[in-house]
Amino acid sequence: MTQRIALVTGGTGGIGTAICRELAAAGYRVVANYFPPELQDAQKWLAEQQADYQDMHIAAADVTDFDSCAAMVKSIEADLGPIDILVNCAGITRDKTLKRMSPEQWHAVINTNLNSAFNITQQVITGMTERGFGRIINISSVNGQKGQFGQANYSAAKAGLHGFTMALAQEAAAKGVTVNTVSPGYIETAMTSAMPTEVLDMIVNSVPVGRMGSPEEIAFTVAWLADERNAYTTGANIPVNGGMYMSA
Ligand code: NDP
């Protein structure tokens, strides 16, 4: 069997890096998408990863731009082959209470965290269904499940992402393509280290497991969903949040 190819958007970020490494360790050819202006950082990242995983690659696209995503997928498919596993992981925060939120802050978060899923997934879904195999994994957030003060934009985008998951899961289920959401709680990355310490301490105190999660714990769940043997889990939202939010 030919080696499966995985594309991870935001692949050079905190959680993205752990996902790329976990998928590479599982034997996939991995392509990490990065934001085009960050070429130098992405090249440095690649050199570090290739010390452990030779078959790691990088590809530029702004996930908020449909044409940029189309061009990236075309070039990956020409160079390496069709994409079998897509992890939509790129994301940003622009926190403000709604009354102080600018239209730019609203649109930036919706474009990067939600519209991106359409922009990229549209490029790969037809190929996946035609070949009869695909794994699409959308990285949402506990705050898409429960809402969060100061995050109307982020919570809306992340909740919307799971709506996208459930609809596409139904469209693709009979064709061997599963679509799932992973909803992390608070994970130790640059995104959370930018938060004030007292806010983080308060959050950690509310986590039953008693600590923040690691990017590797998210990556492990993603690899489980990506596995070929995992063909009967679809349209699911898998929480990886230390028990911070539980639902039936
Ligand atoms: P990072 O900021 O480390 O990673 C986000 C990645 O997305 C970065 O590589 C960033 O690139 C990339 N990105 C942002 N905008 C674009 C764009 N327009 N085009 C292409 N790439 C882009 O954050 P995390 O690793 O913490 O987050 C990864 C995902 O996990 C996000 O979707 C986030 O919402 C979600 N998440 C994170 C949690 C946490 O506690 N850390 C909790 C719950 C969910 P660049 O750095 O160059 O801008």
Image (cartoon, rainbow, N blue to C red):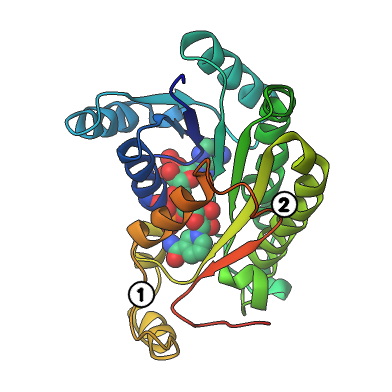
Name the residue beneath numbered marker 2.
Answer: 165
Badge 1 residue CB within 8 Å of ligand 1: yes
Per the image, the residue denoted by label 1 is 212
Residue at image coords 67%, 47%: 179
Residue 110 in picture, x, y percent from top left: 69, 52
Picture layout, residue 167 above or below residue 45: below
* Disc 2 residue type (three-letter): Thr
Label 1: which secondary element:
loop
Q: Is residue 243 left or right of residue 42?
A: right
Could you tell which of marks 1 and 2 lies nearer the N-terminus? 2
Inspect this view and state whether residue 90 appears: no
Picture residue at 44% right of the left edge, 71% below the top: 186
Whether residue 10 is visible here, answered yes or no, is: yes
Q: Quadrant of residue 96?
A: bottom right
Nearer to the camera, 148 or 22: 22
Q: CA distance from mark 1 to mark 2?
A: 26 Å
Q: Is residue 95 left or right of residue 49?
A: right
For the C terminus, the image quarter is bottom right
